Amino acid sequence: MDEDEQAEVPRQMADAARYAAHYGLPPLQTNDGVITLLVAAEVIHEIPGRDGVLRLHPAHPLPAPADVFPLAEDEAAIQRRMRFEAAHEDDSSVPAPRAHGAGMRGWVQLSHQPVADLIRASMDPASVDSEAMGRR
């Protein structure tokens, strides 16, 4: 763990303690404590297997962190940005006719990046590279 990561540990522990307290649980000290919190938050479910032993299964679909934890506004903003980027910033390939010959089909690459930049700007103007947007 580098120095920056090490410096983040106390803040991360405080955040985890806040999440646990939201469910009436003590501060997290062990992996079992983390699992107990995730079960309480219904992020994972304990489901008995055929042998009666409880098995862990992720919720489907997974809830948004803001739906299960009391996020501070800066945490919520980061989560919104990450979900938006995951959903909208990749290039898409869509089948489209090309002029390579009668009846031939090809692929056209479309980028959602300009639209993603505009929407992100409406969410957080400071996060957008306006110079990059002007080049598109």
Image (cartoon, grey):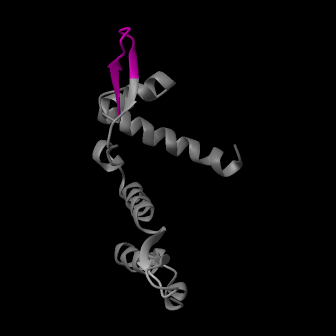
Spot the residue most to the top.
51
Along the line of sight, the residue nearer the viewer: 93 or 120 = 93
Along the line of sight, the residue nearer the viewer: 55 or 25 = 55
Say above or below: 2 vs 110: above
> How far across and how far down the image is residue 62, in percent?
34, 43
Say above or below: 45 vs 104: above
> How far across and how far down the image is residue 111, in percent?
47, 77
Along the line of sight, the residue nearer the viewer: 91 or 28 = 91
Give residue 21's quadrant in the image: top left
Task: Assess whether residue 49 is covered by the magenta stretch.
Answer: yes
Give residue 42's quadrant in the image: top left
Q: Looking at the rendering, in which quadrant would you find the N terminus?
A: top right
Residue at 40% over, 25% down: 56
Along the line of sight, the residue nearer the viewer: 71 or 128 = 128
Q: Is 12 left, or right, of 3 in this rendering?
A: left
> How far across and how far down the image is residue 14, in percent?
46, 40
Spot the residue most to the right.
2
Magenta residues, start to end: 44-55
Count of marks, rendered view: 0
> How far across and how far down the image is residue 68, in percent?
30, 42
Task: Assess whether residue 105 is covered by the magenta stretch.
Answer: no
Residue at 35% over, 12% down: 50
Spot the residue most to the front.
102
Say above or below: 72 vs 101: above
Residue at 55% over, 41% down: 10
Say above or below: 49 vs 30: above
